[in-house]
Image (cartoon, helix red, strand yellow):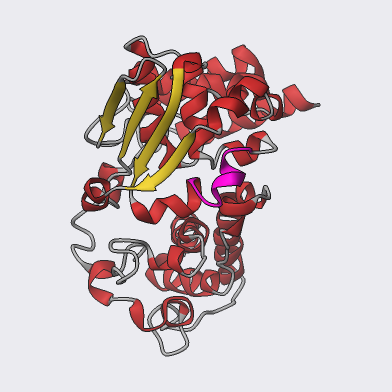
């Protein structure tokens, strides 16, 4: 929904929501959630429009925590889903929304994006082009802007570059992303918590150079202990984050990175990752997708519960549309979580 409605002079290709300090995922996600919820409730086209309009008054989210700390961003997607479901249920009970809640003079776009929003990207190919075909799956549990840097570091590690031999390193990324993963640099070079580390370019590179779990780095690699490890801190202090014209020319269609490392013997090693792993140009395999889910889910629902969900999801493609397979999957997920936490 117009996440990249128009470029600005200061940040070509950047999301205008982002430029205003707003989290497009939690804002647009609420409205998308409302549309999906209304459809599931059978409210029809008019009910769907009302649900989206009502959720526009509930959509919110600021992203300052990405830069300077705080864990609230973890709640944004959940709040968006909650807002959408609530809006649809309210409409079912008779609440209505403004017919121009999105595009009107005092609608969501004008309120949040001012005169910088454009209608054309919102409605172009509506009903013909589906964004699901271009979804990026995140292989690592960290801010997406760090991922190409992680892959570059993993590639250098596979070439034999050792963390203890590194004198300095430059992580080159799209200029618009430096503010999220590279500024303030002193903060990004010394995150105090694992959560702060998830938004640190220096930490992501250092962790990948040391090696981690999962598909390269796993959630346990972003721990408070790892963030404060003296060896990690020492390496992070030698890693800078800068903008790159090459990366700027590709962003926001990808979140590319170039990693340049100079070792103690004076050799410079370079790795370019211009297409994100997990995106349409470099998709995760079915095995990798399964491994990513199980790595995340086992700690919550156990190995048996995680495998049960995997089996149900893999059976969905063969299930008749009216078989209740989706409901069975969600029931199994709920039972697994309740059984593990009771």
Residue 66: percent from left, percent from top: 57, 51
Q: Is residue 139 visible?
A: no
Q: Is residue 315 toward the left or the right of residue 210 in the image?
A: left
Whether the magenta-drawn stretch holds residue 189 is answered as yes
Residue 286 sits above or below residue 99 on the image: above
Residue 338 sits above or below residue 113 on the image: above
Image-quadrant location for residue 256? top left
Q: Quadrant of the N terminus?
A: bottom left
State the residue lying farthest toward the top.
Answer: 160
Query: Which residue lies at the image location 81% right of the left edge and 26% below the top edge?
Result: 342
Q: How many numbered markers are drawn?
A: 0
Q: Is residue 36 visible?
A: yes
State the residue lying farthest toward the right.
Answer: 342
In magenta, the rendered stretch is 182-190
Residue 90: percent from left, percent from top: 61, 69
Query: Which residue lies at the image location 33% right of the left edge and 76% below the top edge?
Result: 117
Residue 182: percent from left, percent from top: 49, 46
Residue 20: percent from left, percent from top: 48, 70
Nearer to me, 165 or 53: 165
Nearer to me, 82 or 179: 179
């Amino acid at each position: 929904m117009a996440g990249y409605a128009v470029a600005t002079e200061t940040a070509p290709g950047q999301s205008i929501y982002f430029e205003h300090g707003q989290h497009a995922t939690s804002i647009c996600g609420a409205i998308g959630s409302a549309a999906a919820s209304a459809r599931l409730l059978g409210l029809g086209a008019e009910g769907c429009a009302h649900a989206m309009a009502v959720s526009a008054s509930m959509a919110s989210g600021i992203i300052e925590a990405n830069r300077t700390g705080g864990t609230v961003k973890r709640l944004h997607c959940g709040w968006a889903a909650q807002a959408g479901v609530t809006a649809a249920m309210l409409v079912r009970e008779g609440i209505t929304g403004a017919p121009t809640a999105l595009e009107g003079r005092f609608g969501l776009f004008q309120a949040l994006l001012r005169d910088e929003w454009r209608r054309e990207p919102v409605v172009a190919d509506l009903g013909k082009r589906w964004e699901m075909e271009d979804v990026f799956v995140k292989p690592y549990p960290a801010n997406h802007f760090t991922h190409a840097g992680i892959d570059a570091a993993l590639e250098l590690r596979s070439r034999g570059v050792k963390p203890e031999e590194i004198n300095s390193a430059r992580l080159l990324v799209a200029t618009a992303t430096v503010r999220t993963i590279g500024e303030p640099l002193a903060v990004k070079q010394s995150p105090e918590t694992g959560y702060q580390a998830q938004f640190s370019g220096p930490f992501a590179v250092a962790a990948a150079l040391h090696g981690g779990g999962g598909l390269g780095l796993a959630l346990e690699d972003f721990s408070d202990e790892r963030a404060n490890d003296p060896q990690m801190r020492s390496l992070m202090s030698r890693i800078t984050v800068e903008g790159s014209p090459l990366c700027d020319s590709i962003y926001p269609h990808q979140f590319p990175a170039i990693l340049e490392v100079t070792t103690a013997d004076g050799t410079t090693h370079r790795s370019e990752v211009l297409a994100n792993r997990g995106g349409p140009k470099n998709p995760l395999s079915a095995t990798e997708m399964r491994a990513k889910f199980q790595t995340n889910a086992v700690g919550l629902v156990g190995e048996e519960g995680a495998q049960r969900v995997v089996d149900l999801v893999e059976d969905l493609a063969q299930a008749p549309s009216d078989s209740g397979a989706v409901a069975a999957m969600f029931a199994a997920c709920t039972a697994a979580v309740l059984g593990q936490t009771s």
